[in-house]
Image (cartoon, helix red, strand yellow):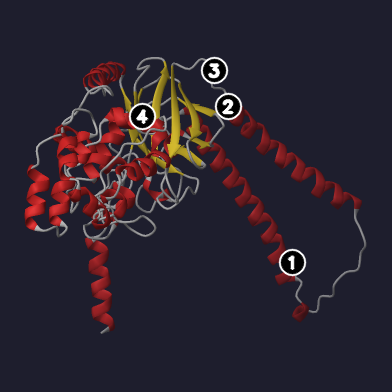
Amino acid sequence: MGVLASCALLSAHFAWAVGDSPGGPAVNEINFQPPVTKIAEELYHLHMMMLLLCTVIFLGVFGVMFYSIFKHRKSKGHKASNFHESTTVEIIWTVVPFIIVVLMALPATKTVVAMKDTSNADLTVKVTGYQWKWAYDYVKGPGEGINFFSTLTTPRSEVNGQAPITDTYLQEVDNPLVVPVGKKIRIITTANDVVHSWYVPAFGVKQDAIPGFVRDTWFKAEKTGTYRGFCTELCGKEHAFMPVVVTVLSDDDYAKWVDGEKKKMANASDDPNRTYTMAELVQRGGQVYQSNCAVCHQPTGKGAGVFPALDGSKIVNGPIANHVSIVLNGKGAMPTWGKTLNDVEIASVITFERNSWGNHTGDILQPKQVADARNGKMPEGGDHLSGAAAPAAASGPAASGAAAASGPTASIDAPRALTASRMGKPQPEAVAARTAPAA
């Protein structure tokens, strides 16, 4: 049985084995990642110098100690000497450590000063930490005006152990930070919720992102390629799921990327004043949900842990005002999405949630209603729970009139009569509720 168990474990190990992560950590790597910036190279040399120095001191101190113990042991007839002090020895063990500390501090101080010199940057990027993703805003230099979120794309099937993991497990994102090679990049960090830390080992860069504070650092990559890092400050449940991925391109390729991103932003710009169809909102909402909500509420809407299920939820199927309020303002472990998503994105994801999985409310929330909600005027209607179905069916003409009326709330009130018929109203009355002429 023991042999079989060992074979099974060995087979499982090889079945789930992964290789080196491109631009990230290598299998069995025990030293720093290969540096691609001058600062990272200096840090590597400092590390090796300190390690060598500590090794020499360790061998010297413990060598003398063990030699003394072995050569002067009691079994050989040695007796301990009695002496009180030695001025010479005390001077030596004071001066020598001082010299060692100075020799260590001089190069380290030079590197630390260089790490903090963010002047004369060619490109400035603001990095904002969120639970659990990064936002990048190009604020100065080539690409100014480009902004996007960078979110983990590792499938949940890998995270849940349902599929073999890849070499980029938990180190792949939908939108990496893109910078040109050989240019000084200034990184400004802050956070929206809790403390995060932006770290790329190959660049020798690690900077905390603190809510309400602005910190900065810089790097100049000398090689093109993709480099990977991660958040190094414990920031909550999904701390391990917010990697940092930076793609370094040649000048020509970077210029093409900037041009493509600006065209993409122009084509995909959201119009908050437009009235969208159900299909448009559901399609866009699905994308917003996968990028922002699926990590907690799961792609299936079944929820996990403290994050409740959305499929069949009382919030999702209840009054739409409550749904909008929670998405805008957050509740408990749920962040405040009103500061992160625009009106179109919030309208889309709420419409998606109310018309996906087992939720078939027929509700449509328009961006204009989200804008009104931000100003305190919440949308009305949308209550599809059994307790709210009876009055909706009883007022058949009014419900039909609301469906025929123009305006953004019509799409919310229209399905009330149909919902009432599903909830057990007598058939003639339900038919009357569905077919009554508009007032």
- Mark 3 vs mark 4, CA separation in Å: 43 Å
Which residue has dot 1 on it? 68
| 346 on left or right of 215 | left
Residue 337 x/y as whole percent: 39, 38
Asked if the residue under mark 2 is in contact with the one under mark 4, i.e. CB atoms within 8 Å, the reply is no
For the N terminus, which image quadrant? Answer: bottom left
Q: Name the foreground residue: 211 vs 307.
A: 307
Q: Name the foreground residue: 402 vs 67.
A: 402
The disc at residue 372 is 4
Q: How crowded is mark 1: few (under 14 residues within 10 Å), some or many (20 or more)?
A: few
Q: Name the foreground residue: 314 vs 247.
A: 314
Which residue has dot 2 on it? 116
Q: How crowded is mark 3: few (under 14 residues within 10 Å), some or many (20 or more)?
A: few
Q: Which circle's residue, 3 or 4, is located before the other in the chain?
A: 3
Mark nearest the camera among 4 and 2 is: 4
Q: Name the foreground residue: 152 vs 292.
A: 292
Which residue has dot 3 on it? 119
Vertically, is 42 above or below 274? below
Q: Which circle's residue, 1 or 2, is located before the other in the chain?
A: 1
Q: Is disc 2 placed on a helix, strand or loop? A: loop
Q: Please tell me which residue is depicted at 16% across the width and 31% down the height of the picture.
A: 277
- Mark 1 vs mark 2, CA separation in Å: 47 Å
Q: Which amino acid, mark 1? A: Ser
Q: Please tell me which residue is depicted at 17% across the width and 52% down the height of the picture.
A: 420
Asked if the residue under mark 4 is in contact with the one under mark 3, i.e. CB atoms within 8 Å, the reply is no
- Mark 4 vs mark 2, CA separation in Å: 45 Å
For the C terminus, which image quadrant? Answer: top left
Q: Is disc 1 placed on a helix, strand or loop? A: helix
Q: Which amino acid, mark 3? A: Ser
Q: How crowded is mark 4: few (under 14 residues within 10 Å), some or many (20 or more)?
A: few
